[in-house]
Image: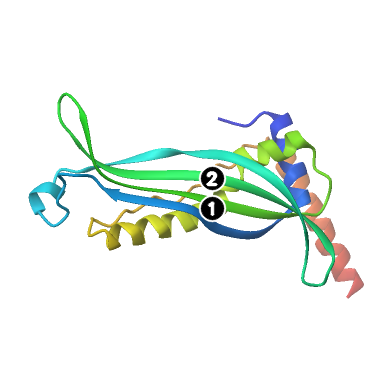
Amino acid sequence: MPRPPEKLRLLQEAIDSLRINDVYLYQGNCKLYPGFDNKLTSDISGLQHQYRNTIVDSSEFIDAVANDEKSVRIFRVYISLGFRWVKADDEELDIKAMIEATFVAEYLVLGKPSDKALEVFATENATFHVWPYWREYAMNQSLRMGLPKAIIPAMQLQLEKQDTSQKKEVVKRENNKKEKSKTKS
């Protein structure tokens, strides 16, 4: 489903004002539930995977001093994710094991984005920076727990559909830039 133009404008405002600085694990939790033996094939077979929806827990600003002693502003987004193995009986869901994590995506603030732009960015874009770290964490933790490898699918970008006149205008501008750079050479 295409994003509304206002949301796209706000997202672009934030993208233009932020630069990725760091991604790191803030909190992790993994657990084998009582009564589950991860070494018994009969307990492992028939397990199903469930994903917890990505949740943007919060965001905050940090004013800091960089190594070169310049003042910098940092925007942090806290994102929680989860994965669990369940045995689905006819009547109830039996959780056997789980992996959860909260990551921080940290951005240098270069401009003055609006609060609304930052909110849209946190919910719409920050997860793309965290996702590869989450995939690696879930896979490694599952192997360390003696469970089948947790393979989290790659996150796919959904490209917005543009009408053909917009596409032609972009191509035309790019061709003009190329022509100008050729004539300068």
- Of labels 2 and 1, earlier in sequence is 2
Identified at 62% across, 60% down, the residue is: 22
Residue 79, numbered circle: 2
- Front in this rendered view, residue 168 or 106: 106
Secondary structure category for the residue under label 2: strand
Measured along the vertical axis of the image, is residue 104 above or below residue 69?
above
- Front in this rendered view, residue 164 or 77: 77
Which amino acid type is marked by label 2? Ile
Q: Left or right of 120: which side holds 139? A: left
Residue 63, numbered circle: none
Which quarter of the figure has residue 181?
A: bottom right
Where residue 90 appears, as percent x and y from the top left, is 15, 26
Identified at 60% across, 38% down, the residue is: 123
Q: Which residue is mark 1?
A: 130
Q: Residues within 10 Å of mark 1 (few under 14, many from 20)?
A: many
Identified at 62% across, 46% down, the residue is: 77
Gap in angstroms between the C-alphas marked 2 and 1: 8 Å
Whether residue 30 is visible, yes or no, is yes
Where residue 105 appears, as percent x and y from the top left, is 60, 53
Which amino acid type is marked by label 1? Val
Q: Left or right of 112: which side holds 19? A: left
Where residue 164 appears, as percent x and y from the top left, is 68, 38
Find out whether the residues at labels 2 and 1 contact each other: C-beta distance under 8 Å: yes
Q: Residues within 10 Å of mark 2 (few under 14, many from 20)?
A: many
Residue at the extreme top of the image, as rendered: 91
Quarter of the rendering occupied by the N terminus? top right
Where residue 149 appears, as percent x and y from the top left, is 28, 57
Quarter of the rendering occupied by the C terminus? bottom right
Identified at 55% across, 59% down, the residue is: 24
